[in-house]
Image: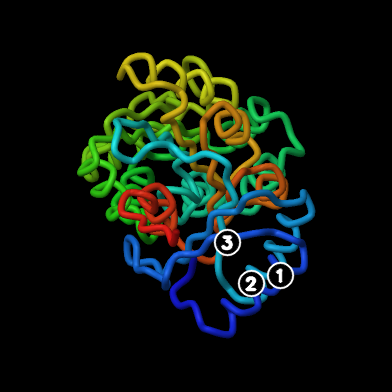
Amino acid sequence: MGETLTTAQLNTLLSLLSSQGVASTMLFSPEVIADVVTMRFLLSDYPDVLKSQLELFAKQATVDFALMEKFPDWSKPGLVLMDMDSTTIQIECIDEIARLYGVGEQVSAVTALAMQGKLDFNESLRTRVSKLENMPISILKEVADNMPLMPGLTSLIAGLKQAGWKVAIASGGFNYFAERLQKDHGFDFTIANTLEIENDYLTGTVTGEIVNADVKARTLKELAEQYSIPMSQTVAIGDGANDLVMMDASAMGIAIHAKPIVQEKAAISLNNLDLQGALAILSAHKNASWKK
């Protein structure tokens, strides 16, 4: 999948498959699915080494690929649960508010380590939030008013809604921002952390249960049950180490411009495409005409 797919790229891919002894059945020609140029193959069998070779090909060709044995059924109701920071939006909100408050470098360094899985998430969150003590809530509003959406987000939500799917946010960030996204863009549900506020200033603490990796995975299962959606119809999209548990719990985990540890473990990694790529993957099979 990519913005374009050339004949040379296709020939290289076919040679790669052939060199691994992979028998493939190919569609007649590339198709544009959800504004993404897509080529689909049915692979009868393939060696484990094929994924790493496809990763190298995708990097060199600036394209993405999805190698899956089974996809959720686009024609039936499903659920997509998304991370927020660096997934639905292009920023880490805590880093932005910290920057505006003058403690940006201290906070962003901790954020980077936490998203790489090198720090306990709960403790890292408390440490970062403590540095925001006495910050006026006007800074929260400034960031919320200017959150840059991840490209493809509105198309993904519209496509999911049209197909009868639910779409939600489970974020280790803050509900101040998640609730704004829900209001403005129609998410069915959001869960995130609550910043304690007194007299229009942050106290430097969070209240309630911290939304960590386990809570995200639990939320996926609870929402699936609430909406009467089988787990085989669930998708999780994220970029950080604290998204891995929910991605593993879902039928399909999609990493979007993710940290290396997430790319390594996710079933699908989008490194070149935006969220349009996720929509293309989910809807790809609905009108397939496979060569006999």
Percent of width and height locating residue 285: 38, 50
Residue at the (77%, 49%) spot, across then down = 48
User: Circle 1: is it few (<14), some (14-19), or many (20+) Cα within 10 Å?
Assistant: some
Residue 125 or residue 213, whichever sits in front: 213
Q: Which residue is mark 1?
A: 16
* Residue 144 placement, left or right of 8: left
Circle on res. 271: 3
The residues bearing labels 3 and 2 have C-alpha atoms spaced at a distance of 18 Å
Percent of width and height locating residue 235: 46, 36
Q: Which residue is mark 2?
A: 13
Quadrant housing residue 113: top right
* Residue 129 placement, left or right of 17: left
User: Considering only order in the chain, which callout, 3 or 1, is on the residue closer to the N terminus?
Assistant: 1
Percent of width and height locating residue 231: 46, 23
Residue at the (64%, 53%) spot, across then down = 105
Q: Quadrant of the image for the C terminus? A: bottom left
The residues bearing labels 2 and 1 have C-alpha atoms spaced at a distance of 5 Å
* Residue 211 placement, left or right of 290: right
Q: Secondary structure at mark 1?
A: helix
Mark 2 residue type: Leu
Q: Secondary structure at mark 3?
A: loop
Task: Give above or below for 169 relative to 160.
Answer: above
